[in-house]
Structures are given as structure tokens and as C-alpha cells.
Amino acid sequence: MASIFQFKEFAVDQSDCAMKINTDGVLLAALVQIDSSSRILDIGTGTGVIALMLAQRYVKSEVVAVEIDPKAAHRAVSNFRNSIFSDRMVMHACSFQDLDDTKPFDFIISNPPFYTDSLHNPDARKKLARHTNLEFFNELLQFSAQSLSPNGCLALILPTLLADDLKVIAEKLDLRLEREILIRSFENDVVIRKIVIYQKGYCGEAVVSDFIIYQAKGVYSDMYKTALKPYFLAF
């Protein structure tokens, strides 16, 4: 894979990053709905792609990012500085647990590591990026509940079973499911991912929608093209 991924309004250098740009990340950034003046936090930013996509889309928003992997954090800083959104982007090379920023966030977003029960990858940096356990998600949800502004939202993309497990934990922290997007590769396939949006103190019913990636093998759906058209040169 080429180290430079060119988007319509910015470029992402992926060299030295354990986790490259992937479908989960770009779909999460493209499908969430955020207030135009929100203060946004991207947890585990990696290359910085989610943060950059949101900075492009929400031109009044301040975008803060954290990344624990030093090499990825260094690369994200470079990607931010080289973008036209650099004056609205802040990078912290640390874990979210160590983030020294007490101002509330209106929106927290993360494409988190979620292989909680799989065999660990022998590459240490890929292990750090892709493997975790439920304690990580407990801490992530607790941090979000404490760090969100009133009516603030948390958006995650997760495997289906993990998404269902976390819903129970989130509700205990007064993070209520406001929206759920069910992602399938093809129309009749099983759901492979869920984008879940929790809102602090939300009292309504969750809005559930479907998203199909492919209309045929190797052919992206109109849904996918529409979602990524503002970003991808191919559409």
C-alpha cells in the first residue's frame, strides 16, 4: 500500500503507522452527524484520518486527537500540520487516560482496537493498535461520560457482539444509545460492524439504519459512494 493516501482536500502519510487507513475508520468519520461548532476528540487517531475528515466537514469545529503509539502520533502531527485545517487541530501523544485537557468535548469519536478474544499479533506495535480487553472499554466509556458536555455524544465502530455488550455498560453511565448504523458487506449478509452513537442523558428511542458497502463483488454501493464522495478522489 502506498504510504501517501490522497484525499480531495488533504493527504495522509501512513508511513511508520502500525494501523493504516481502513474501511472502518473512514465510514465512521463519514457517517456520524456532528453539530457544526462542536469541540471534537478523536481517541486513538493513528494516521489522523478520522480527525482530518471531521475537520474538513465541520469547518467551525476544533478537533483534538490523542494517540499512544509515538511513531503514529508523530505522523499524525505531520499530517495535521500539512493540512489546510491545521489551525483547528491539536495532537496529544498520550493515552486518553493521560490527556491533560479539562475543557468538555461535545463529541468523542473512536475507531478502537477491539480484538478482545483473538490471538495476539506478534508484532508489538500492531498488538498495541489492534488488541485490547473489556477493561479498556470500561475506561473509555467512563472517560467519555466524564468528559462530554451536557447532551454530548460518543461514536464508536465495533463488531456486533461487542457493541451489544457495551450498551449495558454505557447505560449505567447515563450514555444512552441515540443512533445505530448496521454495516453489511452485501445486502443479504450478516451485520459485520455497528456504528453506535451514545448521547449523554438521551431519553428517546435509538434510530437504527442499514448501510451496505458493496452492490456486487468489487463494486461499491451507491450508499458507500455518496458517503465517501466528499473525501475520495475516486468518487
Image: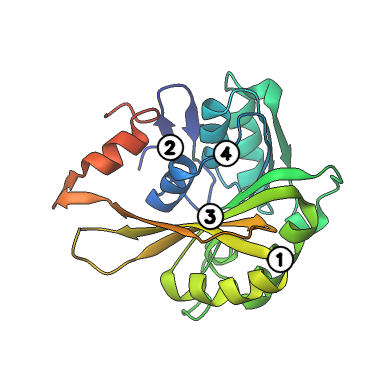
The three-letter code of the residue at mark 2 reads Ser
Q: CA distance from mark 1 to mark 4?
A: 20 Å
Q: Which part of the image, by quadrant, shows the C terminus?
A: top left
Which callout, 4 or 3, points at the residue further toward the start of the chain?
4
Residue most extreme to the left: 216
Residue 183 higher or lower than 131, as above or below: above
> In this figure, which residue is indicated by the disc labeled 2?
3
Q: Residues within 10 Å of mark 4 (few under 14, many from 20)?
A: some
Closer to viewer: mark 2 or mark 1: 1
Closer to viewer: mark 4 or mark 3: 4
Q: Foreground: 103 or 76?
A: 103
Q: Are marks 1 and 3 in contact (CB under 8 Å)?
A: no
The three-letter code of the residue at mark 1 reads Asp
Position of residue 115 measured from the top left corner of the image (x, y, whole percent): 49, 72
Position of residue 203 measured from the top left corner of the image (x, y, whole percent): 63, 60
Q: Are marks 2 and 4 in contact (CB under 8 Å)?
A: no
> In this figure, which residue is indicated by the disc labeled 4?
34
Q: CA distance from mark 4 to mark 3?
A: 16 Å
Which residue is at 50% across, 74% downward? 164
Name the mark on residue 174: 1
- Horizontal side of 224 relative to 176 (left or right) equals left
The three-letter code of the residue at mark 4 reads Ile
